[in-house]
Image (cartoon, helix red, strand yellow):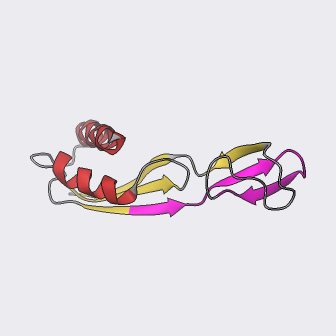
Amino acid sequence: MHEMALTESIRRLLEAEAERQSFSAVRVVRLELGALSHADPEAMRFCFDAVMRGSLAEGARLEIERTPGTGWCMICAREITVARRFDPCPHCGGHQIQVTAGDEMRLKDLEVV
């Protein structure tokens, strides 16, 4: 489950930011999670609670905003919505698609004290 490793990375980011910005606790973590990121939001929530125990984010709420996958079809020269990697273009049926968004995981913002 790579969600555990991702959540541990979030914890390290929170600890570094707490030191840099001098806050003592995190109440809310807002995360953007792309539809093509291969990270399961429910697994992230489960891992978040486990990984944050004993940290400055223990008891914090994790809010996940799902961002859609988009791509550029090289055949029909259109921006398209991509539900899954390697799906064909809904307009021309081609597979020459360059993903342009939706494969990211981004720490959007925090509520801290």
Q: Where is 32 relative to 96, above or below?
A: below
Report the residue at 56% width, 50% height from top: 36
Dominant SS of magenta comes to: strand
Rendered view: 60 above or below 55: below
Q: 29 and 100: which one is in front?
A: 100
Looking at the rendering, in which quadrant would you find the C terminus? Answer: bottom left
Tell me where residue 101 appears, x and y as whole percent: 63, 50
Magenta stretch in the rendered image: 64-82
Q: Residue at x 89, y 47 (%)?
A: 75
Q: Is residue 14 left or right of residue 66?
A: left
Residue in view at x 31 percent, y 37 percent: 5
Residue 25 appears left or right of 70: left
Q: Quadrant of residue 26?
A: bottom left
Dividing the image into 4 quarters, which one contains the N terminus?
Answer: top left
Q: Magenta span has 103?
A: no
Residue 38, horizontal then vertical, whole percent = 48, 47
